[in-house]
Image: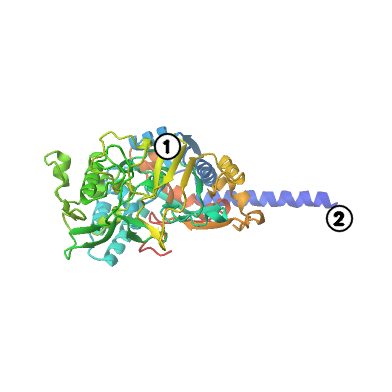
Amino acid sequence: MKRLPTLLLGIFIGILIAIGVCYLLQKHNENVAPLKASNQTVIPKLTLFYNAEELPGEKSLVAQVVQSQLGRIGIETSLEPVPSTIYNDRLTNGQFESALTLWYLDYDDAEGFLTDFYSKSSFRLSKYSNPKYDEAYKSALFAPTEKEKFERYHAAADILKRDLPWIPLFSNSELYLMSPKAAGFVANAYQYYDYRWVDMADIRAATDVEIQTLDPALCYDAGSKHLITQSYEGLVAMDEHNQTVPALATEWHFSPKGDRLSFTLRPGVKFHPAPFLSKPGQRNVDAQDVKASFERLIKANSPYGYIFDYVAGVDEFKAGTAKNVSGLIVEAPLKFTIQLKRPFPTMLPWLLAPAAYVLPAELPAKYDFSKGSVGTGPFALKSWDGSLANYAANTDYWRAENGSKLPKAKTLAIRVIKDPNTLFLAYQKSELDILNVPLPVFDAVMDSNGNVKAEWQKHVFREVKLNNLKFIGFNMQGNPWGNSVELRHRVEQAINRDEIVRQLFRGKARAANSIIPQGMAGFAP
């Protein structure tokens, strides 16, 4: 027989391969994804909604990959990007089937990833309730030793893995490009951004996350945290190694029973000048400011109000039968104590939250935080127009390095630039000194293996692995997906996390198989 021409032979082989692939896909789908659930009802369409103004480029790409992966096994998925205001309102009111969203913490304690599922938590994204989970969570919260705490955290996480109110997807890294002069910039796994050591006169940075508030007590999002942490501080802080270190307190200790947490405040720390202060520019922080700030947090209906739930006298204060919280005790001008209802070691890491930052006791009830900061941080806010925050160095800042005062810079400007291409262009045009590289421009910065391209070799490139969680959360009340653990497991089985990490993030992320990210204290990296 004569040989077929090369072109015809190629076509013939291609047809055979296509037929084979179609057959294998058909057999695969028959085995793993029949279009009927066990009760013989048709699998419903899934609507996945997400905040189109928070990491918009990343959310869109991840949503499309998830949609494709679910489509492979016959789960039809529609994507519903919405503005922040609509997203937050619908999430709060439970008006959704499933949400592609994220969770991050302010402290290195796995409790923060478990609290949303406790039936008495103030904010519960999925409105999940399970008495067995509540028991496991509370047991971990008050565990007498670190070893027992971690064991109980694992037990609580295992319950969630069976019930699947959330499907964990991945924990990502933040990638930074910066000019060599900006190399002193520090970030950590919990998205604290520290510009104090940047040795240049004027720092220009940006965020691609919308700012919700400049009031520390109401801070609950990464964008607001970025701005607030430049001007305000708490009793303790978290360093670049995720360790709790002194800030406005120089030392602290628990009582032998573990039910009293006492602090010694740093002497001579001054608030930023403000006209309502008794001595503008000369007003030192004292224990009364700490007490007033914590009580203000409780009264402000803050998302972090729960951090004082285990303090003595807080129930009477909330009920209005007491003017003050009896367990928030001013021992002396520089001595402050928290009396707890029972031993509770998690009280200390909870105080890392920006909501627990210290403000002057005489702060006006309706103070406008956009007009200027009244904190103790390294940079004082001078102006905010909704898209640009301008700061000046706090010349009275308490921290020094080798005898030189911090911060090293004279000014700091942080712009809000949501569009990833506009953000990248600003860095290319030298309008920014530091770039948090957004996912949609990974192609321009790295090759397919995650290595920095040659044209960026003269820039400082840094990867910071985040202890955050990107996930799909289900509304557990009143819809087919929330009512059926079988349907949720079908979705979970269809998700290829390694494909997301490899193809979208070039390995600059970690697949997540648990609510609690690997790398947190007590959880193997």
Q: Quadrant of residue 244?
A: bottom left
Q: Residue at x 40, y 65 (%)?
A: 524
Q: Nearer the viewer, residue 459 or 112?
A: 459
Q: Marks 1 and 2: CB-CB under 8 Å? A: no
Does the image show residue 377? yes
* Drawn side of residue 328 relative to residue 185, left or right: left
Q: Closer to the camera, 231 or 155?
A: 231
Task: Tell me if residue 506 can be seen.
Answer: no
- Taking the spot 36% from the left edge, 42% from the top edge, the residue there is 482
Indicate the quadrant where residue 93 lies: top left
Dot 1 crowding, Cα within 10 Å, few <14, some 14–19, many 20+: some
Task: Check residue 225 in the rendering and tell me which mark sits there, or answer none.
Answer: none
What element does badge 2 sit on? loop
Instruction: Provide residue 291's location: percent of width, then percent of height.
Output: 21, 48
Residue type of the residue flagged with mark 1:
Ser
Secondary structure beneath label 1 = strand
Position of residue 387 relative to residue 196, above or below, is above
For this rendering, which residue is in front, 183 or 422? 183
In this view, which residue lies farthest toward the left? 321
Query: How far across and down, in percent of the image, does residue 346 sit?
Result: 26, 57
> What is the spatial separation of the Cα atoms under label 1 and label 2, in whole angstroms?
78 Å
Tell which tag, 1 or 2, sits nearer the viewer.
Answer: 1
Tell me which colouring the rendered structure shows.
rainbow
Of residues 337 and 496, which is closer to you in this image? 337
State which quarter of the image contains the C terminus: bottom left
Q: Position of residue 240 (x, y in %)?
A: 42, 59
Question: Which quadrant: the N terminus?
Answer: bottom right
Graded by Cα atoms within 10 Å as few (under 14), some (14 to 19) or many (20 or more), the crowding at tag 2 reads few
The residue tagged 1 is: 383
Q: Amino acid at mark 2?
A: Arg
Q: Which residue is mark 2?
A: 3
